[in-house]
Structure formats: C-alpha cells, structure tokens
Amino acid sequence: MKTILLIILILCLFSSTLFSQIRDWDQLYLMIDRPVADMKFSSIPGISEYGLLFALPGMEGGLAYFTNQDSLNIFSIASNLGAVSIVPDNINNRIFCAFGCGSNSDGLYEFDVATQEFELIGWYFFPHFVKKLSSGYYFGDIDGLLHSSIGDEWSEIEFFNSKDVTDVEENGDGTLFVAADYDIYLENDGTFNSFYVGLIINDIYVRNYPNNDEVYLACGDGGYVNFVYRVEYENGEITGLTSINVFYYPNRIYEYEGYLVIGCKEIGELYLVEPEENGQVQLIGAGLGINDVYCFEFYPIYTHNFMVGTDIGVFLATNLTSASNNELTKINAALLNNFPNPFNPSTTISFNLTTENTEKNTELVIYNIKGQKVKTLECGESLSTKADGVSYSIIWNGKDENNKPVSSGIYFYQLRVDGEYKISRKCILLK
C-alpha cells in the first residue's frame, strides 16, 4: 500500500512541479523564479510541499512556504527587506529568520506559524545566517555571533564581538568550528583556537557519517585563486589546511555519493569533486543558466539527489554520476611546490609536467590575496626528463611586473598550460 501511495505521489509531483521531461536536472516550483538564499524542511503543521521553507532575498522577498501545492505565501517585515537565512523550531511551531542586507530593519526575527506574525529578537546589521546545531541555535552577522540553547534566550559569544562571522558548524563529536574574518576557529574547552586562512570563508561543511570528522571550507569572494580546503586538526588545535582544488568564488559545499558538490557565485558553476588533495573535478551544472549558487538541500522523494537554491529558482539533481560515462577531469596535471616557504626575498617554484604537455605554452602566474595578478613567470627550459614527465624550476624574486618589490603577505602561484589553469599553491612572503 505504501509503495502504491509513493508512486501516486511521485506522479502527482511530476505533473505539478517538474518540467515534463525527466532528466538529470529538473527545475522545481516554477513559480519561484527568483533567488533562493536558503531552504530548510520542517514538521510544523500547515506547511505543504513536505514542509519546505524558503528564504527569498531582495525586494518583495521574505520567508516563503506553500500552504497548498499551488499557493506560495511570502511573509516579510517590509517590501524591501528580504530573508537571507531561516531555521525552523519544530517543537514550538516557529521559524527563526535572518532578514536584510544593509537596512535599518536588518536583524533576527521569530515567526509564529499559527498567527503568521513576526517578533523582533534583535536588530543586527548585515546578517549572514541562522542555524540549528546539536548545541543550540546560532546567528552570525558582520559584528559577532549569538547563541541560544533552545531559542528563547539569545546571548552574545563575546569572543566574536566585532568579528565578521560568516558560518558555524559542528563535527561528529560536537566540536564547534566558526568562520570569522579570514580565520577558522576551533572551540576547545571553552576557548577558541584560530588558524589564518587568508580568504573570506563562505561555508563550513562537515561530511556525513562515517566521515563526519572531515571539515571543509569554501573560501574566496571572486577570482581564480579561491579554494576549497579540508581542515586538518587534532588535540583541540588546527594544524593546517589541505587544498582540495581551486575554484572561482566557491560559495557552498554539499555531498553526493561520496563526492563533494561545489556551488559557485558569479559564474554559477556546479562541480563534483573528489574529497582529497587536488581532487579530480567534473562540471555538472552546465546549461542551467544560473549565475549564483546559494544553498543545497536533499529532496525527500528520491534517494540519490539534492536540491540547489540559485539566483533563478530551485533545481533538482538526480543520477549525476551514473548518467555520465565521462571520467572526472583531472585539473592537477602537475606536482607543484615552492621552497623556502615562507620566504624572503625569493623562492624557487618547482613542478613536473607530463610529457604530452611539454610542447604547450606553460607559465606561472602570481596573484595577491585579492585575486589581482602580480606577475607572470615564463617557465623556460626544463631541468630534467623522467619516465613520468619533465621537471621544471623557476625563481620568483618577490617583485611585480614593474620590477618593484611586493609587500609581505600571502600570495598564490598558479600553473597554466595553454591558458588553462592546472593547479594553484599558496606562499608567504615575510620581510
């Protein structure tokens, strides 16, 4: 009986919310043809479409949900005040909402589903997120981090006062990770230990069980030296970052059949990535027409799927790995490192190229932390030839294209073969 009901439900769903053609990508909820900044499921009565909640940013935006299959309701404080993040409190039939993006009414609000009314918890400028973890509710903005154990009393975590807190997550054993400014923080016995990342952290992602000790970061605000990292940590300390790969403006991370899913802003690309150092990458979102990826969620009907909230609505992905016989494209076609690192005044950058790439135009491009090009280095003659490729070595003297010394700080060097980037690394100039 349950199987029959499920089949009927799927058929109804296909006829009302999906494009008629079933393929690897389908657009859901066609009436939501606008940005979707956040999506969450709830069990609060009165919310249709599996209890799915939407945060719609911008003009005429707000908290949105279906009261029936064809009726989308949008609730807001004002017509110019959209929602950027939401989280339900299913026990008390309420929804916490982060509203605004630079107005005097920005803040954290509580929405009563029964009365459909908002109550202000506090005004907070430029909110980033509100979310629920096992240790309670959290709210972050450009000036700090709030916590509430059950959603009734909210208090500041004073350590993060005046810090731009962009995300917070917990790993499988309950260890708290906080992204603020250019650092990732790990809580250890009530204190926070930091590690300097050097880029804005847009998203912290913890993999599903049994890999929920793995913590990943989507870092950067545009440019081809933005990264996805895995956080390495032990004994309450962050020991380093492992580069998964380089992307343009990675904004959100998810997981699909053992791969990481990377969603980017400005170019709207979606990738499947192996969760390992210099992991292989496959483009999966080509042709969708999206510019920005804002959020991910699962969809309750299908077992192997996820939803994507974008600048033009919600898309459903299914069968992405089985639908294509193409192997993942390996971006890391070379071994790349520099020594010394940190350095002053110069460092030697070494790398290997596979034999088939030696006839192609090869160069190293130096970028600063803002993604601005500092210098292009020609690779010159090879040092030696080995069975698995050709070795190169080139010196960067810490100067820009105008032969002027650059200032101390973090720089990225990127290997390009025939104009296509292959791999990037980070180096530090200390004077």
Image (spheres, rainbow, N blue to C red):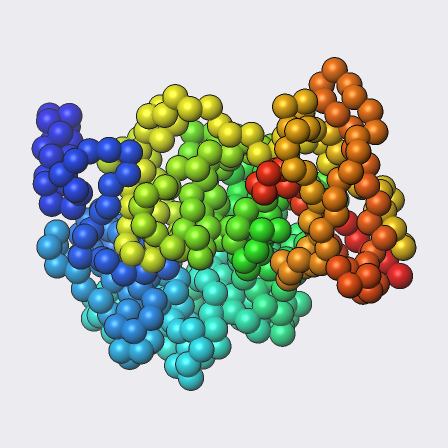
Classify residue 389 as left or right of residue 209: right
Say which of 75 and 147 sits in front: 75
Q: Where does the C terminus fall, quadrant-wise?
A: bottom right
Instruction: Give coordinates of residue 424: x percent, y percent.
Output: 66, 43
Q: Position of residue 349 (x, y in %)?
A: 80, 41
Horizontal side of 168 relative to 410 (left or right) equals: left
Q: Which residue shows up at 71% across the image and 45% down it?
A: 364
Residue found at x 82% / y 24%: 384
**Residue nearest the observer in this picture, 284 or 208:** 284
Q: Which quadrant would residue 197 be assigned to in this image?
A: bottom right
Q: Is residue 347 left or right of residue 201?
A: right
Q: Is residue 325 above or below residue 196?
A: above
Tell me what residue is drawn at x 51 percent, y 66 percent.
140
Q: Residue at x 39, y 62 (%)?
A: 85
Choose between 200 and 385: the one closer to the eye. 385
Can you see residue 91?
no
Above-or-below relation of 386 to 362: above
Q: Position of residue 175 (x, y in %)?
A: 61, 47
Residue 289 visible (yes or no):
yes
Q: Position of residue 28 (x, y in %)?
A: 22, 47
Image quadrant holding the N terminus, namely top left
Up/down of 170 relative to 107, above or below: above
Seen as rendered, the residue at the extreme top is 387
In the displayed structure, 333 sits above or below 94; it is above
Side of 406 relative to 196 (left or right): right
